[in-house]
Amino acid sequence: MLMRSVLFSLACANAVLASGTTVLEEDLEQMWGQDWPFSGIQTFAHLPHEKCLMNRSLDFDIGVIGIPFDTAVTYRPGARFGPQAIRKSSQRQTSMRGFNFRAGINPYQDWAKVLDCGDVPVTPMDNNLALQMMGAAYHNLLNRNSTLKQAELPPRFATLGGDHSIILPILRQLHKIYGPISVIHFDSHLDTWAPSKYPSYWHSNNSDFTHGSMLWIAKQEGLLSENSNVHAGLRTRLSGVGWDDYEEDKETGFHRIECDEILDIGVRGIARKILDIVPKDKPVYISVDIDVLDPSAAPGTGTVEVGGLLTRELISIIRQLDGLSLIGADVVEVSPAYDQSDITSTAASQIVYELITNMVKKGPLDPAMIQANKNSEMDQGDKPQNLAENEYQSLGEGARQNFMESLLQGRV
């Protein structure tokens, strides 16, 4: 039917143009407004593109934003090209062909105005400066308005990485709006290593910020909820000769779900364990490292680990989380140089679509719920182990290293 409509419009256009009659504006939209998957400018899912960072008057509800940053990796780089690859692989998604049969909605034709906000032009030359740029960009974006004026909350964002370190500046800015955040972390790795655990004598402020330490730093800064965070899909090797990594991870407030558990409890069991940990009436952020998938489904990443989830399994788990109060999400660590036939970036684009679907299906968030969450943080007061972001960032190199060592030794 679509093809017939296009051909009919073209036939009419030829007739009108040949006769010299003026073509109406609405006719032009019918004639030329729809792209094929292989045509048009490559925005995510052919969504309208706006430079959201530059347009302060722009109102929207959900934005797709790319952060092409990968200089905090510890193994293979290349995730700076992830946003481009994910967008390219999303081209068979359109608002006309966007109905999610698993969820029963079309997230692109529902209540939410969804845009592609482009990329944050983050520097690859200075990690401290990059961290400031990412934070400033998200601060800027969270000062935009949603189309629902009564909602009193900013738009939400699905972020395309970039390496996994980008979650730290995102959480810093989200915490200012929403208070403590419950993080669902799909990954084969813990990402809660203290920076001083990396095997190097040499240290600087730049070396603190990596794609394996950002959740540890987030905990020290008080950005995370106290005991409702979860890793899902773990399967990497641990350091040393015992369980030290797990013991230290426990101090960050994360629960762990290992990938092998799916063999015993299945996809529904994994989703149920997550829902038993993460409350529905608190702000939730979902972060998906593409290496949570098995290398057969996602070879295009920097730190592959065998024995991972299938794409179908991850999608099914995400679909069962659609009742959570999702304030944002990311898909990170897509490194297209190592991909085969775009299967990694295609998986990533589908996961982004599922996460946007969750935001839309849940509907607008309740400002009263957010305020209650922020009030609970104020009632609890500052925890001794937490260091405010501005104080942590203002420490000199020596003091910062001493603080980290004190944390590891339990003196703080």
Image (cartoon, rainbow, N blue to C red):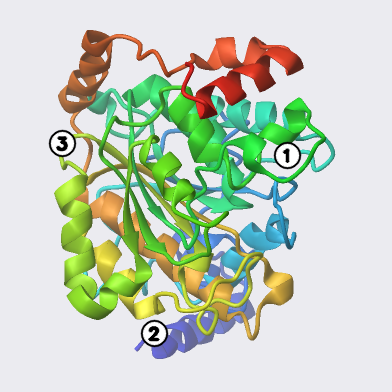
Residue at the image point whose x is 33% and y is 23% from the top? 179
Give amino acid for label 2: Leu
Q: Is residue 52 left or right of residue 227?
A: right
Give amino acid for label 1: Val
The x and y percentages for residue 49 are 56, 50
Tell which of 272 and 55 is nearer to you: 272
Say which quarter of the image contains residue 248: top left
Say which quarter of the image contains residue 392: top right
Looking at this rendering, what residue extends furthest in the front direction? 241
Dot 1 or dot 3: first in sequence order is: 1
Q: Is residue 350 visible?
A: yes
Q: Is residue 72 above or below residue 225?
A: below
Mark 2: secondary structure: helix
Mark 1 = which residue?
A: 122
Mark 2 = which residue?
A: 2
Quadrant assignment for the N terminus: bottom left
Mark 3: secondary structure: loop
